[in-house]
Image (spheres, grey):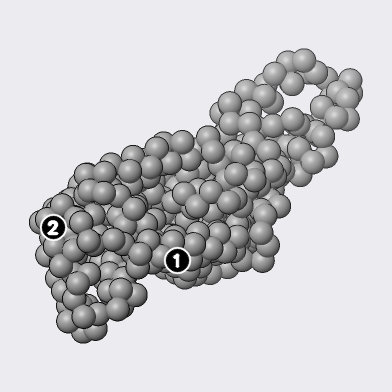
Amino acid sequence: MSRLGRFERKKSFMSAKNLLLFALLIASVLTLLIPGTIAYQKEQSKRRKSYSELSSAGWGSEDWGAAIRMSQLLNLYPSMDERPAEVEAELEVWRRDSHYSRRVYMRWIGEDRWRDAVQAAIDQDTNIRDAMAAGIIDARLGGNAETLQELDNRIRKNQYLLDHDVRIISENADMTGFSFLRAMLQTLFPILFTGAIVAAAADCVASERDTGSFKFLLLQPFPRRRIFGAKLAASLLHTFFLTAVPLLVGFCSAALINGMGSAAYPIAYCADSYRGLLNTGYETGAVSYIGLSSWLIRLLPLLLCYLLFLTSFALFVSVAAKSGVTALTITITTTLASSVMRPYLTSIPVFSAVWPFSYADPSAVLSGEMQTTALLGIIVLLSFSAVLIFGSCMMFCREDVTC
């Protein structure tokens, strides 16, 4: 068995095609990191100046919008005696909004007052949310209409920053180690990593048919189930290596250049992910916030199950196909088509829940962007993997080598 294992590992890890795929993933990670680091360093140089631009923290100033709305109301109702109570209530809302904006954008000098800025943002959003809930205003002015739930989500996120003493960052530009790891999982994994994994595992059996070595392998004095087990184990090990090493290289590179970043930075998380089979908050958009390290721990089981499914799928096609080209064509075409169609297919509740390629972006599942949950995803992926592995084993054991 050890000889079989060494043979399969050497074939998987030292294949020219697989080495090229590994190099492609490393190059893609660095390509994502380099321009992002340049933008991040420019952002950092701005923030090191005497005035810190809070717009980089994702907050757009509504001070001018509040002033315009107050001017409109004062022109319509110049006399306080003739001003209706509801107009006075709306004026008070915009006075407060303007006040909070000035606190944040005109008086926050340097990084030392970040807690005041976050608290001011919480006060501002709470003021708007309460006014919307009371029917005083319909939505925030300035073209940034928001729902009550969106305001609630942002208030919870900013409150998390205060409660856990986490400094605000620019999420779109941040290139520190933890943030870049999250960016790789969200940007590169659903399409690039998925395609590379199935392409690497697709020639596990099919390539041996092309070279003619498959027949001689089956004639060796080993039970076929053991040969299949060695191939499956080597494929799983190579899949994990092909995923973990580029992610680790990206994480370490970003950490060395830009620092580790905060593992406690809040990430949107669907509370249904590990306690139910359906996401009940999908329609409302309600989310909780957890630290990045906790988010990664919750992501890992779903990610590993998806890697198992990809390996099982590629192995099944490799056993069933008659040539390496056929196996590569089927696996890559299927995964790319599924990736392109995923935004449309995930809008169908039942189909997206049971279609395993719906879980190509585990971060989207955890953040509540899909109607299914991580718990159901694990069940679906393990079930499909078991069926594919069983089917592959049956076909492999019954392979005719007389020809």
Q: Amino acid at mark 2?
A: Gly
Tell me where residue 354 appears, x and y as whole percent. 58, 51
In depth, the one of 199 and 152 nearer the eye is: 199
Q: Which quarter of the figure has residue 82? A: top right
Residue 67 pos. (x, y %): 62, 27
> Depth check: 170 or 362 in front?
362
- The residue under the point 76% across, 44% down is 130
Quadrant for the N terminus in the image: bottom left
Q: Is residue 269 left or right of residue 390?
A: right
Q: Are marks 1 and 2 in contact (CB under 8 Å)?
A: no
- The disc at residue 390 is 1
Q: Amino acid at mark 1?
A: Phe
Residue that label 2 marks: 212
Are there few (<14), some (14-19), or many (20+) residues within 10 Å of tag 2? few
Secondary structure beneath label 1: helix
Q: Is residue 210 visible?
A: yes
Note whether 11 is above or below 27 in the view shown.
below
- Of 219 and 21, which appears nearest the observer? 219
Task: Tell me the SS state at disc 2.
Answer: loop
In this view, the residue farthest toward the bottom is 2
In x, y percent, where is residue 299?
47, 64
**Badge nearest the viewer, 1 or 2:** 2
Residue 103 pos. (x, y %): 55, 46
Residue 87 in the figure: left or right of residue 254: right
How far is mark 1 from mark 2, CA to CA?
Answer: 25 Å
Q: Quadrant of the C terminus?
A: bottom left
